Amino acid sequence: MLPDSLKDDAVAAALETALPEAITAGHAERNEPTLWIEPARIVEVCRYLKDQQKFIRLSGVTAVDWQPADPRFEVVYLLHSLVRKARLRLKCWVAESEPEIDSVSSVWRTADWYEREVFDMFGIRFRNHPGLTRILMPSDWEGHPLRKDYPVHGHKYSYQDE
Amino acid sequence: MRELTLHTDSITAVNATHEPLVQPPAPSTRHMILNMGPQHPSTHGVLRIVLELDGETILKAVPDIGFLHTGIEKECEVKTWQQVVTLTDRVDYLANLSNNLVYALAVEKLIGDIEIPAKAQWIRVMMAELQRLNSHLVWLGTHALDIGAMTVFFYCFREREDILRIFEMFSGQRMMTSYIRIGGLALEPPRGWQQAVGKFINAFPSKVDEYEELLNNNPIWKRRTQGVGFVPLEDLLDLGVTGPMIRAAGMKWDIRKDEPYSSYDQFDFEIPVHQENDVFARYRVRLEEMRQSARIIRQAVEGMPEGAWQANAPKIVLPEREKMKTQMEALIYHFKIVTEGFRVPAGEVYQVVESPRGEIGYYMVSNGTSKPYRVFMRTPSFGNLQSLSALLEGRLLADSIASLGSMDFVLGDVDR
């Protein structure tokens, strides 16, 4: 459902008409339009925004850990349209019990590495990703460093032990 | 490969009863796997590329990153807002002021009711442009060195030294300046800065002429760069490439013009664009950008507004030393900022800046406390490096050095 603050936003309104029920919430604080999307429909929404609304660039994909909230993770997509000179932020909630969401790398190839980074740092799995492996941490690393319950110092191994 | 077979033959002859120590490759496979890096001079840092070669042709190039991963984003979550500034320096060590700037702008946008005085904004622009010159000079020097033009390197580092001296004059630091802070600048611009910057910027355009004289008509340089490293513009955009590579592919897109920040809209400058979309075009774009940056710096020196260099926000900006020693309020604010830090209203923001390499964007989430809840650094090198496979695959191995250099990535910026 489209919130009142985004009723004047052409892109959000067009998305609501084209794909009803895909938007679950939204805001336009600090002039940055943000839409929460139904996680199961993220690929469909991204495909529509790229093909029909000229959001040909994806600046990045990241996540926020809201522990102890449920659902715990928020996956954030930063979209950019060069023609409109506009940016748009999409968000999806992902539960801790089943941290999975569809990959948008079929829409923008640049999502490949960003989704690998989110997987590496938060442990969120992306379905249909071409090669979901760790990207920054070593491949045999345990744990996901940007989760809030992952300590900043002293994870398993301490330099003081040496 | 023939040598390898001979060698194993001799081994099998000696140990006739045992298995050969090295299995000779099957006659049909002619592909060779080559590890380039992580310690390789032309990768400009610790980047590993696994290449599959058919003779001299690269069939597959898979970059392996993460060797310089320092966990800066995690570290940001345990530092106060003001402390994070020093971490942003270390993301991209050739564009630390651009990172300072984007961080300061993002936090100021989160705070909302803070007004940055015109002088601070202009100094920020001037420093960011000096930084762009610095970064492009290092790029040009090392890139030319990779391709075999050694003289350019010395010329570039000569000018870079002047820029680093200017940074030292302003901030006391040559590389990790932390000069742009939330609410303004770290220090008042030093006495005599106009002369120092003015002297440098008057001499600089003729230095760019020197580089062009060395390279523009250099047959070796042209043969090694022209027509090399072509990737269609649509693919570049799809792969997340930003900055000079896009402008060398014929697209006039610069965040300084499209989404002006820090009073860039008050400056008069052009966006250089080239159509050829090869290594030579990227070189031309960056050199012309250096001329435009020099133009911006000159305008900043000549038209610098008078007034304060910090915002009038005592709860956010540290008080002057003298006031701190004589006024009670100033002492209290100082104590609060240093010990507890200041609180930033809850919310989220994505702020972008045009760095020498492309789009730096910081996506920041605040939960209303004195520390950032989440900082995501969208760094240009990470996005640009994704196009590496597209740039190298199907091309010659010898061209890979020129293609790699033309991307101008910084590994600290890739791995964060």
Image: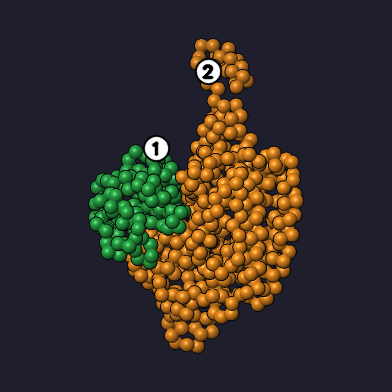
Chain colours: A green, B orange
Select label 1 or label 2 by which is in front.
Answer: 1
- Identify which residue, B176 or A93, lies in the foreground: A93
Q: What's the residue at 32%, 45% (across, down)? A: A44
Q: Quick one: SS at disc 1? A: loop
Residue B400 percent across, percent down from the top left: 60, 38
Which amino acid does the dot numbered 2 rest on?
Ser
The x and y percentages for residue B246 are 54, 49
Count of numbered marks: 2
Whether residue B281 sits left or right of residue B185 in the image: it is right
Residue located at (61% from left, 44% from top): B276
In percent of width and height, residue A86 lies at 42, 58
Whether residue B401 is visible here, answered yes or no, is: no
Disc number for residue A130: 1
Q: To which residue does mark 2 refer? A: B28
Q: Is residue B338 left or right of residue A150?
A: right
Q: Chain of mark 2?
A: B
Amino acid type, label 1: Pro
Mark-to-mark CA distance, 1 and 2: 29 Å
